[in-house]
Amino acid sequence: MFSTLTEVTEAHNAQVSPEFRVLAPGLVIDGNEVIACTRLTEYLIGDSYSSWVALFRGPDGKYHDYIVWTVVAWPDGWVREHGSYYQDRDEAWEKYEYRGGR
């Protein structure tokens, strides 16, 4: 069975259409790991898609160690928008909270 919340979330996301996916800490999207996330909007069929403000750890620190994105669960998959990029985790966390993260 599952031993972590990340495993449960990954299993859920594998079984549903992309617009029903859930973002959670520990998930990796295109090499970027979710450190923290807060849902901003719920998915309402015919109206809006689920969205989150999320703090990510970059894949290798090649460009930026931390990224704050708005992430939307679109029918075509995850879409990341409005990125803010940081080398310092504390600065990234401040931006995450400023944008609604808790």
Image (spheres, rainbow, N blue to C red):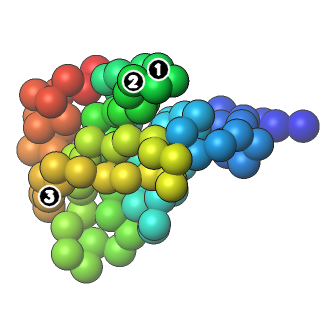
Q: Is residue 1 left or right of residue 43?
A: right
**Does 51 sit above or below residue 28?**
above
Q: Nearer the viewer, mark 3 or mark 2?
A: 2
Label for residue 47?
2
Residue furthest right as drawn: 1
Q: CA distance from mark 2 to mark 1?
A: 5 Å
Mark 1 vs mark 3: in front = 1
**Image position of 3 with respect to 57: above or below:** above
Q: Which mark is residue 85?
A: 3
Is the C-beta separation of discs 3 and 2 under 8 Å? Answer: no
Q: Position of residue 89 (x, y in %)?
A: 19, 48
Q: Secondary structure at mark 1?
A: loop
| Residue type of the residue flagged with mark 3 | Tyr
Please name the residue that numbered disc 1 is placed on.
44
Q: Is residue 81 left or right of residue 26?
A: left
First in residue order: circle 1 vs circle 3: 1
How far from the left and from the top, in percent, is residue 100? 20, 23
